[in-house]
Amino acid sequence: MKFGSVALIGKCSVGKSTFINQVLKVKLSITSHKVQTTRNLISGIYNDDDSQIVIYDTPGIFKSMNLMNEEMFKATKRCLSSSDLILFIINSTDVMNHIDESIIKMIKNTDVPCILVVNKVDLITDEKEFFERLNEYKKLYDFKECVAISALFGTNVDLLIKDIKDMLDEGDPIYDTELFTNQPVRFLVQEYVREKVINLTHEEIPHSITCVVEMWEEKENVTKICASIICEKESQKPILIGKGGHMIKEIGSEARKDIEELLGNKVYLELFVKVREDWRNKKDLLKSYGLYTGKAKDEDE
């Protein structure tokens, strides 16, 4: 049986979360066209008759300044170094830039084999131009394989899984084969709420909020959940609540659908909005929200 860990890396909005959801056939990672959707290392567990593959969906790489984003970057680097295989995901329409070059440098520093995954193959309109762009990536690194897929439609995802298994060693599974993640259910609920905020609000709001489950109560045929949406400015609170409470009701209604599908029963979801000034730069708050580990910086940083 094949066993191993695979780290996904790439710029924001290249489809890493969509890929892991497609592979697992379940909604594990939240998705959005907006940057900084994934913040934590989301681990999915793929199981079939002859393999178990632990897949880490890492935060997208982009230039940032606050403490939270610095911690996300460090966590990604640690994940790459400790994995058995890396998938560097790009879009079929991407043009090489400095972020891609930084990612390739990170990959080189790990000595971990890497597959170049070209997502959104359905958007290719000029094959000659596409291969010219692709060669720019290949010039910088000797990828073990290059696979073109559509994470959204599932095109060639089965072929990529086969390539991944071919590159992994024999080993026994370490997780129950019925599991699709080792993340707590509460974490997934928090992410579902945050996803709805990201997709329903605009401007700076999506980047400056997080969500925390405050209360969880199991009753007969219903789960009661109270959660807080944390923002960092008083001016953001009325936007999240909306006129007459319209926005927070819509966020709750949309999130509840996903949570009920996850839990398989009826859910009563109550949401609150709290202000924690500049929380993305405060270690104590980041720790309480599960976004700061306090681990030492890497030597090359």
Image (tube, grey):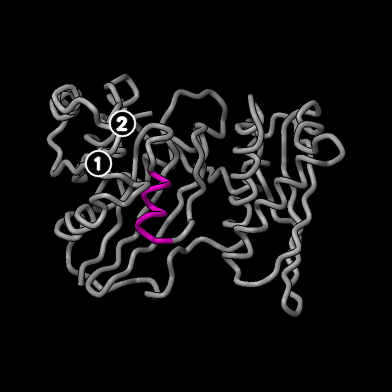
Q: Is residue 272 magenta?
A: no
Query: What residue appears at the point 21 percent right and 67 percent down from the top-left corner?
Result: 2
Q: Residue furthest right?
A: 244
Query: What residue appears at the point 41 percent right and 44 percent down from the top-left corner?
Result: 58
Q: Residue furthest front?
A: 125
Residue 30, above or below 178: above
**192 displayed left or right of 252:** left
Q: Residue furthest bottom?
A: 220
Secondary structure of the residue carrying numbered label 2: helix
Of 198 and 289, nearer the camera is 198
Query: What residue appears at the point 78 percent right and 36 percent down from the top-left corner?
Result: 275
Residue 269, above or below 217: above
Three-letter residue code for mark 1: Val
Highlighted magenta segment, given as a residue range? 16-25
Q: Which residue is mark 1?
A: 117
Give x and y (percent) for residue 112: 21, 45
Query: What residue appears at the point 77 percent right and 50 percent down from the top-left corner?
Result: 271
| CA neighbours of label 2 inside 10 A, class few (<14), some (14 to 19), many (20+) | some
User: Which quadrant, please, contains the N terminus?
Assistant: bottom left
Secondary structure of the residue carrying numbered label 1: strand
Residue 297, above or below 261: above
Of 95 and 273, nearer the camera is 95
Q: Which residue is mark 2?
A: 103
Q: Quadrant of residue 121?
A: top left
Work out how far the residue at label 1 is from the one at label 2, CA to CA, in angstroms.
Answer: 14 Å
Give x and y (percent) for residue 134: 18, 28
